[in-house]
Amino acid sequence: MLAQTLRASVPYVLAAQGGVWSERSGVVNVALEGTMLVGGLVSVAVALTTGSLAAGIAAAALSGALVGLVHVCAVELGRVDGIVSGLAINLAAAGGTRVLLRAWYGSSSNSPSLAGGSSASTGLALLGRALVDPMTLVMLVVVIATPFVLQRTRLGLRVRGCGESPEVLRAAGVSVSRTRAIAVAVGCALAALGGAALALEQRQFQSGMSGGRGFIALAAVVLAGWRPGRATLACAAFAILDAVQVVLQGQARALEGLLQALPYLATLVALVVFVRRQTSGGAPAALGRAERTS
Amino acid sequence: MSRRRLWTAQLEADALAIVVGLAAAHLAFCVLVWLYGESPWAMSRELFVGTWGTPYGAGQVLFKATPLFFTGLAVHVALRAGLFNVGVEGQLAVASLAVGALGAHLPLHVHAVVAWPLLFAVAMGSGALWSLLPAVLRSRFGTHEVITTILMNRLAGVAVNVALGVGLAEAGSVRTPDVVLGAHLPRLSTLFPPLRGSAVSFAAPIAVATVIVVVVLLPRTRYGREAVLVAANPVACAAERIPVGRRLLESLVISGALAGLASLGTVLGYKGYYEQGLGAGAGVTGIAVAMLGRGRIVGMLVAALLFGMLAQGGLVLNAHVPMEVMEVLQAVVVLAVALGDGAVRRQVMEALRSVAVRAEARV
């Protein structure tokens, strides 16, 4: 059970940290879901072609950063509403991954499987497998690094400044657009890594395999008041729900529907219960406001 | 005189945006087709022939566009109040299931005059019900409706699954039993014989009429006028005693109700039952329709027809260019329109500014 939770939490946590990076800089990012898909496909595709997992992971991060750049350009330069751009990216990713799947592997639903990896599936063996998985390591690094970078480094301060009061930063001579670009690129790279974790875990890419995790990760960010540490906790809670689903699968047919609905119901309930009334729920003050060039 | 000037500027800006959107769609289509090694010219021609070239094709385009008329309208209504109803997918799924299930269990010889209003009401009610929770969460607690409606979409998938499994479906399948005869919507081919063979039903003209009626009526109601004000500046509205929360709630609920009507044409007019997954994608495309249509009647109708054409065209061109390309095309169009929106907004702001300057000069 612990092992399942750990396995399940990696994509959520990575995507949520990505969301934190992006949204703390003031750019709304509903494109986490689509970025996860892109990262998943790229990681599997590169791993299949080069035979190297590391290359796949790196490529996934790069592709995520590219998607993030598209998003931030649309929002900052093109003045597109962050939500619209995010939705468009999700659409493009969903369709695009299927198109590429078809083009590269002839099937619009699955990619070929990656060889290798242990086949442990229960108990301690599974826990061991989850712990040595490189993506788990990545997740741990990110979870520790993100709050540190955001709170204690100059870059982090700038990112947070962009989110709270971009005017102040601009007056200080810092380029708000450039900082946001970095933040969103990092954020989407993380989300793509989350997708890569998902795909590499299954040793293949399936169309639509992110299954709403990106949105739940975003909800986790909102629930956590945009704080990375709490977002991780929220993701852990969702991962537990996922793990419960997997563990109880096949037992108690009648409950199956309820189990499937559980993550979403829980998120909704949590959104109601944990909402903070002050300043729109603790969101960065400049969230959603594009840089204004006079 | 100055108000006239502003109105024309807005009209011009919207018309320009719509044309740019269409052009962007075609350009993207050509690029994608070219990437597949096919000739854009040949594919474009085949696209037109397969859709508008024959009465059957035109009927199919109308059939595919019918849900989009409704979903585009639904998204538009929410957008007026500054809300993004991304939950149209879930709302239409739940409503279609309800209609399919109820339609199958009506008395066998019920007359259409009784069945249709009932089923329409059920569709609207179910859709509104599914948007109620996000609506309340947004109006009472300020919870962002994008997240809540997306969660409701996922929940809808599970709920439909469970409902079908629990007994609404025919044994061993994932569809409801056939609806009774009186509930069927007749095909348009009964009125227009050339359309024979195509799936378009009376739902299409009903959809178009709904769009016209709603868009025309909205600014004439108190709710309609205040919703736009709420979108512009909720704080000022609150100061003016405009019920912000209530307007937000009403907007999402009405949007959900309209979304619920989306699959009526497919369930009652074509298939005669509800099947799991029917109508999927209409919600997301509805967002594209609303963005491209910019709230103008003609705009939304044209946008829905465009995407209907792309849907039908996807089938026609499937041998050369896979259907998934159409999804990517949709995304490109949405982005292109949104990018154009910035330019459009600047134009309108210019007109506003010149109007204000002139007014000041007169004083």
Image (tube, coloured by chain):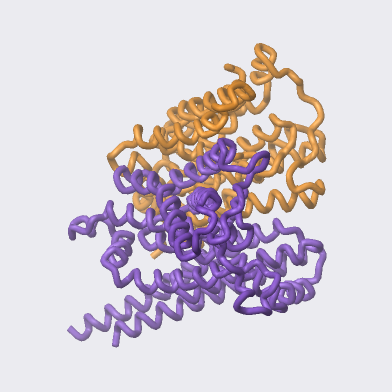
Residue A282 image offset from top left, x and y in percent: 34, 39
Q: Residue at x 56, y 45 (%)?
A: A185
Q: Picture quarter containing residue B185?
A: bottom right
Q: Picture quarter containing residue B49?
A: bottom right
Q: Is residue B194 left or right of residue B153?
A: right
User: As displayed, is residue B359 above or below residue A89?
Assistant: below
Colour purple belongs to chain:
B
Image quarter in which the N terminus of chain A is found? top right
Residue B132 image offset from top left, x and y in percent: 38, 47
Image quarter in which the C terminus of chain A is found? bottom left
Q: Residue at x 47, y 57 (%)?
A: B119
Query: Is residue B89 visible in the rendered structure shown here?
Result: no
Q: Residue at x 53, y 58 (%)?
A: B109
Colour orange belongs to chain:
A
Q: Picture quarter containing residue B232?
A: bottom left
User: As displayed, is residue B311 above or below residue A112?
Assistant: below
Looking at the image, the residue that sits furthest to the front is: B109
Q: Is residue B171 left or right of residue A185?
A: right
Q: Is residue B201 left or right of residue B53?
A: left
User: As displayed, is residue A154 above or below residue B294?
Assistant: above
Q: Nearer the viewer, residue B110 or A185?
A: B110
